[in-house]
Amino acid sequence: MDYELLRLLWWALLGILLIGIAVMDGFDMGAAILLPIVGRTDIERRIIINTVGPVWEGNQVWLILGAGAIFAAWPPLYAVAFSGFYLAMFLLLCSLILRPVGFKFRSKLEGRRWRSAWDAALFIGGLVPALVFGVAFGNVLQGVPFRFDPTLRMTYEGSLLGLFNPFALLCGLVSVAMITMHGAAYLACKTGGEVRARARQMGVKAAIALIVLFVLGGLWATQIDGYVISQAAAPDGPSNPLNKAVERSAGALLSNYGTHPWMILAPLLAIVAALGAAALARGGGRAILAFVASGLAVAGVIATAGLSLFPFLLPSSLDPVSSLTVWDASSSRLTLGVMAVVTALILPVIMLYTAWVYRVLRGPVTAESIAQDSHSY
């Protein structure tokens, strides 16, 4: 396989892994966000926690795979993102740590204050990652303030507060609405009674909020500057971001949709699938279909961001020439080839094992099942 095709393949695989993170790890974050809203009593909250308690650790595999893929396939992207977004990543990591601690410690004591404190921790552990991931995407779409010197040493000139700009916060709200919708769809599949009814109601509201915020973000994107390659480097050439010329241009984020009209399918999928998830949740009785529609909406939102940026991976607002693209930010041809073979062998195993786990754990979580299981949360 030639170098250009390998780069395209790994760009697509990166998108698939990001979608996997949002779909698989997203619903347990969404369940955590909904914990104080859908769960009114202690037993209802235990039901919600026990729907995700046995599977959230397995879902983290997608997060690890995504970070590992960036590190191995796109080293400059890993270096810039994890250096420039260091404080945001630290905030994200702290919030993620709250989830396992909350799951393990909440049931140790029966005091109301004790459990309410850990419920708040679980809520934060779901809300903050969803918000930070969306804010990160918003900054990537606008461009990040970094540059390379002639020796390819990177300098980042941004700040943590600078990441939370208005457009990035809107993208963060899109992410929160998307994750909340997905979590509500999952709870509707795994619970019953009042918890399921409230989850369906919240799913409808979150899906509508997602559509409104997503459309608003698209309209806003037409007004911000995007990036255009005016002099391209060879698609199969060495990975050097400085071997090209880049210009900023208003509305450039939408230029790919004019060049490749089929890309419009991604935002259409996001909107139509979110509408379908809302309709199915409101109708009731088709929880699994609503969950599938929710997952498709998640895929559509993330695919829209990736296709809008292509071929950029991480534009530079400080020095557009330093922007990282699919053609100049990858590992070597040999590395990408070996990783492609390993991924082709391992990824199906992970997916089969995940499917087997969810088959074993199928069925709703009820108060009776919690009472009978001494290992429940």
Image (spheres, grey):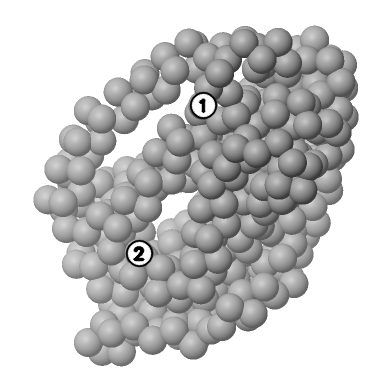
Quadrant for residue 303, please give it: top right
Question: Does 47 sit above or below residue 330?
Answer: above
The residue sitting at 65% across, 39% down in the picture is 109
- Whether residue 47 sits left or right of residue 338 in the image: it is right
List the residue tagged with mark 1.
54
Question: Does 16 sit above or below residue 135?
Answer: above
Q: Where residue 1 sits in the image (x, y, percent)?
A: 17, 41
N-terminal label among 2 and 1: 1
Quadrant for residue 234, please give it: bottom left
Q: Where residue 57 sits in the image (x, y, percent)?
A: 46, 36
**10 Å crowding of disc 2: few (<14), some (14-19), many (20+):** some
Res 201 label: none
Q: What residue type is labelled 2?
A: Tyr
Q: Label 2's element?
A: helix
Q: Which amino acid does label 1 sit on?
A: Pro
The residue sitting at 61% across, 74% down in the picture is 163
Question: Does 101 sit above or below residue 162?
Answer: above
Res 78 label: 2
The residue sitting at 30% across, 58% down in the picture is 71
Q: In which quarter of the image is the C terminus?
A: top right
Quadrant for residue 52, please give it: top right
The residue sitting at 56% across, 35% down in the picture is 23
Q: Nearer the viewer, residue 211 or 43?
A: 43
Q: Which of 338 and 224 is in front in this view?
A: 338
Question: Can residue 344 be seen in the rendering of this structure?
Answer: yes
